[in-house]
Amino acid sequence: MSGLIFCSFQRAAKPYYLESAKQNIYSIEELCYFLQDNIYLLDENIMTTEFCDWLETEVEAEELAQKLRRLMEDQKGFRMFCMQIIMDSGYFSKNEMQFLGMKLQKMDHQSNYENRKIKADQLMEKKRYLAAISEYRSLLLTAADNPSDVRVSGDIWHNMGTAYAYLFCFERAVSCYEHAYELSHRVDSLKAASQAVCFLEDDERIQWFLQQHHISKDQFASMKKNLGELKQMTEGSAEYGRIMQYARLAQTSPVQARSEIHMQVDAWKDEYTGYKG
């Protein structure tokens, strides 16, 4: 899909909040844009009279709202509900509709557990780390009741560790990576745990970790060297350069520097809010 999209329906003054996706939408076109790449982030919670009422009153899609109500009355599933939106929106090409139809059909044939795992992974990809962690924890609580193997549980623990690392919660990240390694014995989980423990700057904790996992001083020195290389890359990044620019500006024009720093902090706040999902 590319180019200019002509909106066939009215833009809502009041948005509809997609609970499962943690996102507001203001139009059918915005919903379709979301569906195109994030269909796993939706679930049956969208099948409500409130959603149909919103379509009818806010975006003036009365005919679509009536069709969706009938589908709910006839107890049709999530796939048919979404396909009705996809077909009536006028947003998608024939090939795109077929592609989304196949995705929805695949979701029908996968277990709820599998679909939720994909949803959690998509939340990670969208950098919505707290929402991903919440979904991963929920999956782990129900893992015993699902036909998932140890490797899948190990993957969940590893991904959750990565989410915590992105949030600078390194102690929790280490714990998650260790759980992952215990389950699946993936070398990259132990490596990730070793890197995360370095950020704790706690010599006693680091020594305990090395003893627990039989990591030699030479191996650990190599890991720290990798972190040093990462630090050098970070210092060469555009964002680091911007921060150094603020520091230099503060020497010559403190008022301007303060203003620009405040704008940067606001941008970081918005980005972090996105991580929380």
Image (tube, rainbow, N blue to C red):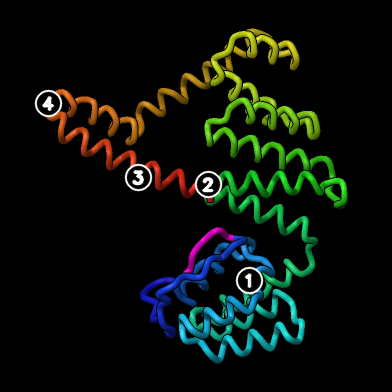
Closer to the N terminus: mark 2 or mark 3? 3
**Which amino acid does the dot numbered 1 rest on?**
Ile
Residue at 55% of width from left, 58% of height from top? 22
Q: Mark 4, mark 2: which one is toward the viewer?
A: 2
Whole-angstrom CA distance, mark 2 to mark 1, is 21 Å
Residue holding disc 2: 276
**Magenta: predominant secondary structure element?**
strand
Callout 1: few (<14), some (14-19), or many (20+) C-alpha neighbours within 10 Å?
some
Circle 1 SS class: helix
Closer to the N terminus: mark 3 or mark 4? 4
Residue 268 sits inside the magenta stretch:
no
* Numbered range of the magenta stretch: 21-25
Specify the quadrant of the image occupied by residue 86: bottom right
Instruction: List x then y, in percent, for residue 115.
Output: 72, 59
Residue holding disc 1: 46
Residue holding disc 4: 252
Residue at 76% of width from left, 86% of height from top? 74
Q: Nearer the viewer, residue 198 or 105?
A: 198
Residue contact between numbered discs 3 and 4, judged by CB atoms under 8 Å:
no
Residue contact between numbered discs 1 and 3, judged by CB atoms under 8 Å:
no
Residue holding disc 3: 267
Callout 3: few (<14), some (14-19), or many (20+) C-alpha neighbours within 10 Å?
few
Residue at 64% of width from left, 50% of height from top? 121
Closer to the N terminus: mark 1 or mark 3? 1
Q: Mark 1, mark 4: which one is toward the viewer?
A: 1
Residue contact between numbered discs 1 and 4, judged by CB atoms under 8 Å:
no
Closer to the N terminus: mark 4 or mark 2? 4
**Which amino acid does the dot numbered 4 rest on?**
Thr
In this picture, residue 185 sits left or right of residue 166: right
Instruction: List x then y, in percent, for residue 29.
Output: 47, 75
